[in-house]
Amino acid sequence: MTQKYIKELIDGIATAKQKRKTDALSAYETGMELMFNSKPKYDSLKEEFGEGEPEFRVLANDLATEVLQCGIDYFKAAQRSTGFTGENALEILRSANELALDIQIKSRIEDNIQGVKDWVENQTLQESQNRIYNFPSIALKTAFSFMTCDGHIDENEIALIRKVASESELFGHINVDQELEFLIEVINQMGMGFLKDYFKVLKNANISEEQELILVQIAMDTLNADAKVDYNEVKFFRIFRTLLTVSDDQIRAKVPSINDEFLETDIFSKSYLDQLFDDYFEHASIPEFSKMSLRDRSKYVKPKL
């Protein structure tokens, strides 16, 4: 029985290696099948010989190495597949770790486990960054920030956002009503910190000049939707303006009606930007907004400016 088990393990390793090389995407199933079929024989031989027996150690490490390689090949082949989470790769690598006896092999397995964990963490971070920095999200946050920066939500501002959502792809596939409810909850918790965070997102976003001009358009449309502009809104726009790379001439071409008070001619030095930032956030305040304002379904009315 002992020699039979040894032969079956050797044959199983060889078969798995061939299948793995032929179809890396199926290497998870190949490795787990090898593990499932081999574990009872492995345990029996381990009990008979003990971990110190040289022949058993070689066989155990060969088995662990093949299961490990199945995990590695599967991960490399599947990591770009839609819906891949890394969990299957971690499962098979941990299975390999249960079999390995050699310290160097165990160390290699642990390095690969950590590598997959790092990949999973990076993917999670990337997904989070994509949600934050994708342009439809930035566009909606721009409209929301300019709607709330004066401390008041006007029904015509909400109607404008809904109109833009229904008539264009600016906000992508975002459910605008749900997102507005969520953003109201967030700004009620964060207060002015929400608007500061918006500026951080805008500063770090990688967007084109064309997209910047689209943001300028939605910002001005939102500011004007309630048919009045106060000085805090002007200051808020000036901060927004300093975070864009487009020229004043490009902005005027995009929004011909824009008043010169929104556009500064000064050089944007750090001290100037700091003063501009402090001037707005020291004098403006954010109340607690009610979601009741979202219940109004009035149609957007273009304001007379």
Image: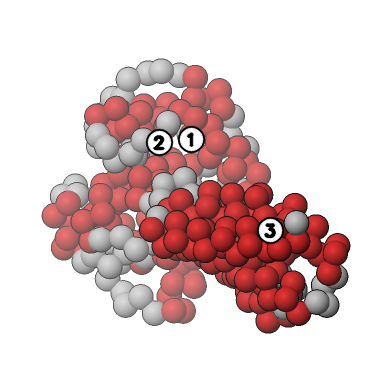
Percent x, y for residue 196? 53, 58
Whether tag 1 and tag 2 are in contact, CB under 8 A, the answer is yes
Task: Identify which residue, 90 or 13, lies in the foreground.
Answer: 13
* Left or right: 55, with 144 as reference point: right
Q: Residue at the spot x=19%, y=49% of the render? A: 255
Crowding around mark 3 (Cα neighbors within 10 Å: few <14, some 14 to 19, many 20+) is: few
Whether residue 289 is visible, yes or no, is: yes
Q: Quadrant of residue 267?
A: bottom left
Whether residue 239 is visible, yes or no, is: no
Q: In which quarter of the image is residue 229?
A: top left
Q: Quadrant of residue 186?
A: top right
- The residue carrying mark 2 is 174
Relative to residue 43, is residue 136 depicted above or below?
A: above
Image depth: mark 3 or mark 2 in front: 3
Q: Residue at the spot x=30%, y=50% of the render? A: 215
Kind of residue sitting beneath label 2: Ile
* Left or right: 301, with 55 as reference point: left
Q: Residue at the spot x=51%, y=25% of the render? A: 293
The secondary structure type at the circle numbered 3 is helix
Number of on-image labels: 3
Kind of residue sitting beneath label 1: Glu
Kind of residue sitting beneath label 3: Lys
Mark 1 or 2, nearer chain start: 2
- The residue carrying mark 1 is 179
Image depth: mark 1 or mark 2 in front: 2
The secondary structure type at the circle numbered 2 is loop
Percent x, y for residue 74? 48, 58
Mark 3 or 1, nearer chain start: 3
The label on residue 4 is: 3
For the residues marked 3 and 2, what is the alpha-carbon distance in whole angstroms?
62 Å
The label on residue 266 is: none
